[in-house]
Image (cartoon, helix red, strand yellow):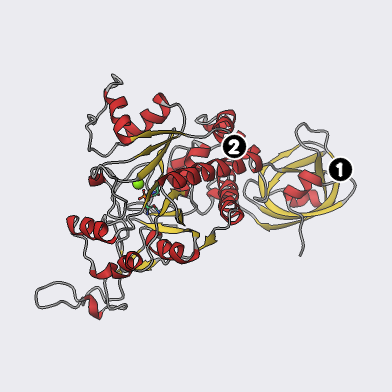
Amino acid sequence: MGRDRIKSLLVSGTPGRAAAIGGWVRSKRVSKSCAFLAVNDGSCHGTIQVVVDANSPEFSKLEQVGTGTSLRIRGQLVSSPAEGQSVELNAEHIEVLGLAGPDYPLQKKGHTLEFLRDHAHLRSRTTTFGAMFRLRNVLSRSVHDFFQSRGFLWAHSPILTSTDGEGAGEMFTVTHFDLNKIPKLENGQIDFAKDFFGKHAHLCVTGQLEAEFMALSMGDVYTFGPTFRAENSNTSRHLAEFWMIEPEMAFADLNDNIELAGDFFRFMLSAAIKECPEELQFFETFYKNIKVEELRAVADKKPARVTYTDAVDILQKSGQSFEYNVKWGMDLQSEHERFLCEKVFKSPVFVTDYPKDIKAFYMRLNPDEKTVAATDFLVPGVGELIGGSQREERLPQLEARMAELKIPKDDLQWYLDLRRFGTVPHAGFGLGFERMLLYCTGIGNIRDTIPCPRVPGLISF
Ligand code: 4AD
Ligand code: MG
């Protein structure tokens, strides 16, 4: 039951050769002498034009064929007189596999992204989501291409964990308890010792802590996997399940980390521009929030850098009125982040050396003892794309910080061991994969970058 991918026919199909395709009808047009079907199989942005002669016995099979119908078609490739396509397929045999009928939710007219979110199982048949998911695939591969070419090992961090790697308490519990009969201790607390793992278990909010022990033995590693956060934030930039890439380097400081993050971001962007030109052009034309030329310029240039302290100064002197007033010590809000990269630097920017009180426990304390060796990478249209830091590799400082933040040490003894036995300076970061897709496409809502978005109140698909 072999078939030719429509992509390979459109790219290198030579007229005169036999071809067999399988796909879904995007549109049908009938004239006196023939019918034209635009067929897509997901392999590429475009459709192949299938021509069915009105005098052929196949023509009668088309009566109920419409948008969404699945077909298998054999025929001959011929050079196409139509503009924008080199070949078309003269149908010799058509097999109608599945009609879609008048109830098919995706009619030829365009649908809103909101409507398509309610039909997530069908939306990948549309031009927009076909483009998004091909881009997603290209960017995924570029992650491995980048790190493998630099000698980083892909480390598989766990999804189930007992630790809160960010210390932010935004974790989903994983339990095997009968929810109607949860065992309790005398003090009324839940007796997790009786649960499946003998401990309170969660879905991971990061793979960083495990990547750290892998780096402190294997050198340079990266993780790439799903990450879960029970943040109750219903924004266009947050998902409860998202994919994160977290490289971790031994014998490295914040500077090395920023160099790596900038190179990685530009590599991914270049891969998108090179391998998905039609898709990006489509997003530029249709959604109008990106320009491929501008993405290319960003990919060609080293990002800007500014310290948090200088950024606060710039924001305070900008004369711009923000919803949240800017004060040293505050966490920058999305409006500040976007103002910095969109208006001040007019390019992606690394903000470094944040106040320790707004950052995670594992970040290395700077000599000023007020700030940590952290960086957030901000990009236009999105805000924070990357968060990273040099890690606190000194045991006394790390213990002191954990005590300050009341982070229980018991579960993290193994993490402290890394500082007890053969510690080295090390650094890493996390890039939110769906935010990268937001940046490249300008689609506006992170729910439209992943096949099955999970956000508060939504898990149907
Ligand atoms: O800044 P974050 O929380 O950093 C960490 O998780 C560190 N452990 C990374 C490290 O140093 N290894 O998250 C990193 C990135 C953010 O910059 C953002 O792009 C993305 O992950 N992110 C989310 N993306 C979608 N939905 C969410 N709820 C996200 N939370 C974070
Ligand atoms: Mg962050």
Question: Tag 2 or tag 1, which sits nearer the N-term?
Answer: 1
Q: Is residue 50 visible?
A: no
- Distance (Cα) linking label 1 and label 2: 29 Å
Q: In front: mark 1 or mark 2?
A: 2
**Residue 308 position in % (x across, y down):** 32, 35
**Residue 333 position in % (x across, y down):** 30, 36
Q: Which residue is mark 1?
A: 78
- Residue 280 is marked as 2
Give the residue at x 31% y 77%: 197
Image: 202 above or below 79: below
Extreme residue toward the bottom, this view: 194
Q: Residues within 10 Å of mark 1 (few under 14, many from 20)?
A: some
In the picture, measured across the screen, residue 22 lies left or right of residue 117, that is right
Query: Type of residue at label 1?
Result: Val
Extreme residue toward the left, this view: 187
Query: Type of residue at label 2?
Result: Leu
Q: Is residue 178 visible?
A: yes
* Secondary structure found at label 2: helix
Give the residue at x 36% y 39%: 352
